Image (cartoon, rainbow, N blue to C red):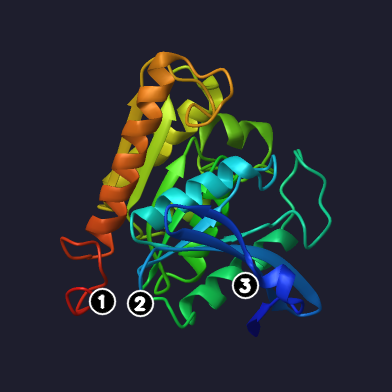
Amino acid sequence: MKTTLRRLPALLLATLVGVAGAQSIEKSTVRHGSLAVPVEIARPAGSGPWPPVLYIHAKRGYEDVDREHILGLARDGFLVMAPDWLAANMIERWPDRHVPESEDDVEAALAALLVHPDACRQPVGVVAKSRGPFFAIRLAAQRAADVGPIVAYYGHFQNPNAPEPQQLFSVAPEVRQIRSPVLMLIGDADLELRRHVNGRAFYVLWERGVPVELQMYPLARRAFDFRADQSPEEKIAARHAAGREREWLRRWMGLGPDGRCPGAAPGR
């Protein structure tokens, strides 16, 4: 699949659309076939190259909370690309089934990020939420050389379209194939099925020798990291998760103490 990264044609559409400190978000598109996939790119302050991270949103759609998350990753020194996998195929928010065509949209963003001029030439880290981790493990199984560590927030580790017995008692076949280090972040008050599937995936990965950790947050519900009615405990869990995310990506992407790419000159 040939993928190209295009800046939006009008200057106003290619300008910065968000600023937090010196970080910025730029709107662009990546193309595959006849489709143009909207992406947002968050850059750290200063000059690159920077370690690349692919951000995969949940099925609710790409929202301001996602922009805040990618800006936080940029503050931590990562170049982040976030595709809107609902938009290109005109999928309504909150789809109950998985739309396989949307996987091409996410893969197009991965391909563009790998060759982005400001990205380090290394496997891409992935931060994904809810439905997003299913995209991540599919990519990691198909493109093992291109996908580095995965951070999964309350993630799907089973195909959402799988029959009910598989949802209840097994994990996606990709869990038995991938080698990417996986950090699972989930609340102990999340839905029972989601907690069980995360637990089963943890054991499968661990027994295969894949680096994996499961962080269970007491008193935390689904979307603990951004929900409008966050409890005091969920606010702490969100801060803790951000620190774990940063540490996991830096460790398994082989970054230096300053968070820069392997082999990068100090101060670059």
Q: Is residue 106 above or below residue 244?
A: below
Tell me, for residue 49, which label it has, or none. 2
Q: Label 1 belongs to which residue? A: 268
Mark 3 Cα-neighbour bin, 10 Å: few <14, some 14–19, many ≥20: many
**Image point 62% across, 32% down: which residue?**
165
- Whole-percent x and y of residue 162? 66, 42
Q: CA distance from mark 3 to mark 1?
A: 28 Å
The vertical placement of 177 against 159, above or below, is: below
Quadrant of the image occupied by residue 250: bottom left
Q: Nearer the observer, disc 2 or disc 1?
A: 1
Q: Quadrant of the N terminus?
A: bottom right
Q: Is residue 1 visible?
A: no
User: Of the residues shown, which amino acid type is indicated by label 3?
Assistant: Ala
Amino acid type at mark 2: Pro
Residue at figure coordinates x 46%, y 83% from the top left: 117
Q: Nearer the viewer, residue 108 or 213?
A: 108
3D distance between C-alphas at marks 2 and 3 = 21 Å
The kind of residue on which mark 1 rests is Arg
The residue sitting at 51% across, 73% down in the picture is: 113
Q: Label for residue 168?
A: none
Image quadrant occupied by the C terminus: bottom left
Residue 7 at what x, y percent from top left? Answer: 67, 78
Q: Are marks 2 and 1 in contact (CB under 8 Å)?
A: yes
Q: Earlier in the sequence, mark 2 or mark 3?
A: 2
Identify the element where label 3 is drawn.
helix
Rendered image quadrant of residue 105: bottom right
Select label 3 or label 1 by which is in front: 1
- Callout 2: helix, strand or loop? loop
Label 1 environment density (alpha carbons within 10 Å; few <14, some 14–19, many ≥20): few
In the shown orientation, is residue 46 left or right of residue 37? left
